[in-house]
Amino acid sequence: MASPVELVERSLADATQDEFDRRVIEQAANLTTAVRNGRLANPGFALGLECELYAVTDDTRLARLPGEVFDGPCERELGLHNAELHTAPSPFAVEGIENQVTQLRRQYQRAQRAVNRHDVELVLDGMWTVPPPEGTVSYLSEVDEHGDVTVAENMTVSPRYYAIDNDVLDRAEGTLSLTVPGTVRDFPSILFESLTSSIQPHVQVPDPELFPRYHNTAIRTLGPVLALATNSPLLPPDLYDVDDPYKLLETTFHELRIPVFEQSVNAGWEKVRFPDDIRTTTDVVDNLVADPTCAPFLREWIAREDSETFDDQFWELGHKRGTFWRWLRGVIGGQPVGEGDQWSIRIEYRPLPTQPTITGVVGFQCLVAGLLRGLVSADHPLPELDHGAAERSFYSAVESGLDADLAWITADGVRTTNAEEIYEEIFDFARSGLREQGVSTELVETYLRPIELRWDRRTTPSRWKLARVREQLDRTDSLEVAVREMQTEYVRRAGTTAAFAYWGQ
């Protein structure tokens, strides 16, 4: 098998893109035909989840993960400090939610045991802020040149990641810039995206004819739901160049993960962005084909046995989907829960940062799934909200969290920016959607009430972090010390069974 560098060189060749795009178009036509022939019709809803983490030492410094952890439940992510847990899909019902919780908790505990043997810890968090010993800039900027191929030293050894990095770098003429309140930095790699960690609730929709309504409804929930979840308000302090740290705390975004990811890829093109509406289910395929190709690979480069699975029939199309970066996307493929030769279609809800606790992670999974089910079941007019207003609402939540300028259409068809009205409907329809799926009131309240308390008490993880740093600054007058003290307390609390809303102010 070719080396990672050789595979990157093949990927960047013009002939590879031509052949890759030809196969994508052919596979897309076959998939569209299968969709129109009813291959996506399924008897029920299902839930799934992805959850990213990072590793720290016992003094909360960023740490590279030992290889042993990837022999168990974890999968590798972009940086050597990153890992991902993911649950197998479960029916959207009481037993399914309980199964999601059990899977995630067991995987998290098993991964913790593996890394604890190496004196490191996995953290449920949206962004790391205490750098490794060599400092953030050195860690994210150390690269080697192998001919025309750039390899970031602290990037996971992966031909796919290397190819994406080099494709993006070529378009950016070798330098990527990060500009957020308090810092303007250039980097020689996309690796600065590994500052961030996310969760992705998945909702499998059984009726493909209704999928566009679910998709377009979900787009209009992104701003209000993200505002409840914000958990990445600060970069590592050694990335800042500020004279007044108090001003930084006032001007920083509540969800830096969004601009960090967008800016790590978007130089020269708009690959990471707010999603478009769709009119038909096959638009999911058409939009994927129309998206600019990034880091193409051909199936025969990867050693695989011939088979008739979905992934093998649509290999290049699936590979392209891996660089179709939208903050919400539709995904076709994979076997649905409990079905034979049918395929599935799901919504991947992608803007949410990793939450401090398992309860919070599953809480947002329940909120998203229940909300979409409740709104669509009630034929709620939310899809009538102007797409531009939904996009502005989303980016306002990125910047301002719970103080965002949100937009909504009420059940009565009235446009509103009143957050009290918006969140009243969000939790009402999330509860009704969960009840429609037979979820008990006790289970609903176990996972939704702690999220609702964030609104009632006007608290989110990002607000908690900024308040803790402000308190420490009053004592130390050092942003570095204040952030470290905050992060130490966060790591101590994260991963416990107590929901974030009960941490106190």
Image: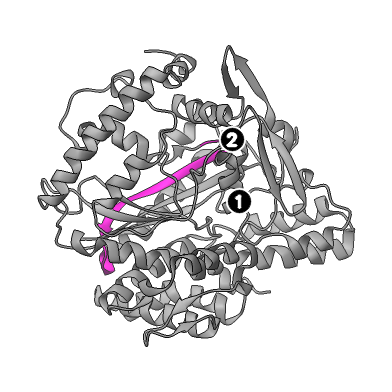
The stretch drawn in magenta includes residue 84: yes
- Which image quarter is the N terminus in? top left
The stretch drawn in magenta includes residue 54: no
Q: Which residue is mark 1?
A: 259
Looking at the image, which residue is at 83% across and 58% down? 245
Q: Nearer the viewer, residue 360 or 43?
A: 43
- Where is residue 343 drawn, in percent x and y? 18, 48
Q: Which residues are magenta?
A: 78-95
Under mark 2, the amino acid is Ile
Real-space CA distance between mark 2 and mark 1, rounded to the nearest whole angstrom: 13 Å
Residue 190 badge: 2
The quadrant in which residue 347 appears is: bottom left
- Which image quarter is the C terminus in? bottom right
Placement of 184 over or under 371, stated as above or below: above
Q: Is residue 461 left or right of residue 313?
A: right
Residue 71 badge: none
Q: Looking at the image, is mark 2 or mark 1 earlier in the sequence?
A: 2
Looking at the image, which residue is at 53% across and 68% down? 393
